[in-house]
Image (tube, helix red, strand yellow):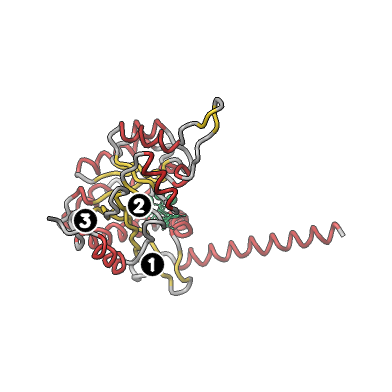
Amino acid sequence: RAGQLGRNRIEWYDAYLEEQLVRRMDLERELPGAASRGELDLVYQPVLGLHDGQPVGAEALLRWRSPALGTVLPSELLPVAEDLGVIGEIGQWVLQQSCRQLASWDPRLWLSVNVSPIELAAPDFVSQVAATLVTNRLAPERLVIEIAEGRVGADTPTVVTQLAGLRALGVRTALDDFGAAQASLAHLRRLPIDILKVDRALVGEQGTRQNGGIAKPLIDVVVSVGRRLGMEIIAEGLESGAQIEQARAAGCQLGQGFALAHPAPAERFEAFLAERLTQPN
Ligand code: C2E
Ligand code: MG
Ligand code: MG
Ligand code: MG
């Protein structure tokens, strides 16, 4: 009986591994050339002022519309792209498409583009950004480049150099997912960062009991340190009114999340702007 159970488990495990392997092979076969075949797409998630609900910018998020595999999310495609060495061509497309879109929007808005450490470390990354800004006649301050805190690893000096290079162009830099894996003071001190994106892991934090009382929620501490370092703070992953309230109470000026607005294709994002963005006086 025990033997039968064991065998079922092994069969289940085999089937699971096989499924994973087949999926991986499908991704590896289809992904190269996806950019040049026109299969990549961007959706845009608004970033709003928490005091007035005004859109101030957006984040560009990658979608792969694969004819063979359907829509594939970045969490699945990015590791494959990095392993295959095609992250560079994908990143190039993302940057160019982002800047083209941004140039067509209200000049008060900025757009944030995610980059992996591999893209950032490319020796010509900063000059490619510079060229794309010129091509699209964009004010550099309207572009934000995001790097996830959890991926600022062993090669911190390269990250520092490249972020500083972007800043020298006038481009703004953001530290993404702060607090998801770590919440390192060293990162806050050492990295040339303009915008701190506080991960939803901290936004959900309700504070811990300490010395018989309730300690300040971690988000309060992170926001006050970030502000003291002159950073703009965005609370990410806001999914409820309570979380919006908590972020606002902690001193976050800006927020992003499903409770405020979902990521949407360009046309729907533009409709959102038309409805929500007040006219300049
Ligand atoms: P991220 O930069 O932290 O982007 C936010 C992610 O959280 C997005 O997932 C977004 O759809 C999702 N999100 C937004 N609001 C909420 C919310 O209220 N609740 C929850 N649970 N999730 C929310 P997405 O689009 O699947 O992207 C995942 C990650 O992939 C991004 O995380 C970013 O690290 C990476 N990524 C996305 N686009 C690109 C790209 O063009 N290039 C690179 N290198 N990385 C990208
Ligand atoms: Mg991001
Ligand atoms: Mg994030
Ligand atoms: Mg994230």
50 vs 265: above or below: above
Q: Residue at x 79, y 57 (%)?
A: 6
Residue type beneath disc 1: Ala
Local secondary structure at mark 3: helix
162 vs 17: above or below: above
Eye-nearest disc, 2 or 1: 2
Q: Residue at x 53, y 62 (%)?
A: 24
Q: Horizontal and vertical percent for residue 101?
A: 24, 62
Q: Which residue is mark 2?
A: 114
Q: Which residue is mark 3?
A: 132
278 or 46: nearer the viewer: 278
Q: Horizontal and vertical percent for residue 227?
A: 31, 35
Which comes sooner in the sequence, label 2 or label 1? 1
Eye-nearest disc, 2 or 3: 2
| Quadrant hosting residue 36 | bottom left
Residue 273: numbered disc: none
What residue occupies the far right of the structure in this picture?
Answer: 1
Residue type beneath disc 2: Asn
| Circle 3 crowding by C-alpha within 10 Å: few under 14, some 14–19, many from 20 | some
Q: Residue at x 43, y 48 (%)?
A: 243
| Quadrant hosting residue 12 | bottom right
Image quadrant occupied by the C terminus: bottom left
29 vs 168: above or below: below
Q: Is residue 227 visible?
A: yes
| Circle 2 crowding by C-alpha within 10 Å: few under 14, some 14–19, many from 20 | many
2 or 24: nearer the viewer: 2
Distance Cα–Cα, label 2 vs label 3: 15 Å
Q: Is mark 2 within 8 Å of ligand 1?
A: yes
Q: Which residue is mark 1?
A: 34
